[in-house]
Image: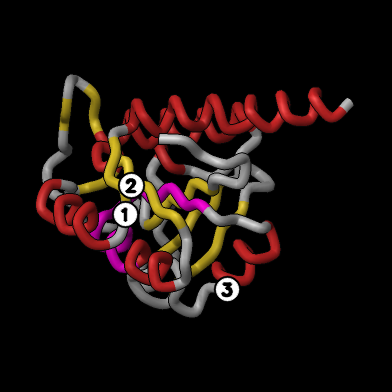
Amino acid sequence: MRLPADGTLIVVGAQEAIERPCPSVRDGRSVEANLASLIAAWRKEGLPVVHVRLDGASESPFEACGAPLQGETVIDASAESAFAGSGLEGLLDDAGATTLVLCGALNAVEPTARDAGDLGYQIFIPFDACWPAASAAARLSRETAAVVDTAAALNAAATAKMLERRESERKR
C-alpha cells in the first residue's frame, strides 16, 4: 500500500453513542488501539485527519481513541455517509485530496466508501480499525476499496511524507 502525501484519514462515527458489538480483538490489538495508532501516525507525519460526527449522535462525545485535537477538522454528517450534508467533498477538493483512509464505525464507513468511490477517490479501509469488520469489509474489498490492515496503513503513513520530502530535496 502506498499513499500520496494527501492521504486523508477520515474517522467516521467514533462516538460513545454509536452502538457496536462487543470489542473486537485481532492479533492482540483492539479496534480502539488500532484506531488510536492510525490517528497518532497521521498526526506525526502531518497528514490530514478529519473526524466525522454522525447525525443522531452529534451531542455524544468522541471515544477517547478517536478524539480530535484542537485545530483538527471536525464535521457533522446528516446521515451515515460522511459525505451526506457535511461539505466533506468540498473540503477534500480544496485540499487536493485524492486518497482516503476510512476507519471507525463500519455501518458509516461502508456508505462513506461507496460515496467516495462514486466521486473517484482511491480508498483504503484498515479493517481492524473498524467496528465490526468481517462481512462488510469483504464486500467492500470486492466492490469499492482496498481493504488492508492497520500495519499496512501505518507503514504507508510513514512513507507518504518521506517521499514528498525526498522529492523536495531533489528539486533543490
The answer to if 101 sits in the magenta stretch is yes
| Circle 1/circle 2 CB separation < 8 Å | yes
| Circle 1/circle 3 CB separation < 8 Å | no
Instruction: Residue type at mark 1: give it.
Output: Ala
* Residue at mark 2: 125
- Upstream in sequence: badge 1 or badge 2: 2
Residue 109: image quadrant is bottom left
Instruction: Residue type at mark 3: give it.
Output: Gly
* Colouring style: secondary structure
Gap in angstroms between the C-alphas marked 2 and 3: 21 Å
Quadrant in which the C terminus appears: top right
Q: Mark number for residue 87?
A: 3
Q: Residue at x 50, y 68 (%)?
A: 76
The answer to if 42 sits in the magenta stretch is no
Judge depth for marks 1 and 3 and give the one in front. Answer: 1
Q: Percent position (x, y) of residue 46?
A: 65, 34
Q: Residue at x 80, y 24 (%)?
A: 170
Q: Which residues are magenta?
A: 99-111
| Residue 27 vertical placement versus 58 (above, below) | above
Q: Percent position (x, y) of residue 25?
A: 16, 30
Q: Percent position (x, y) of residue 33?
A: 33, 29
| Residue 130 vertical placement versus 92 (above, below) | above
* Residue at mark 1: 145
The local secondary structure at tag 3 comes to loop
| Circle 2/circle 3 CB separation < 8 Å | no
Q: Percent position (x, y) of residue 51?
A: 50, 53
- Upstream in sequence: badge 2 or badge 3: 3
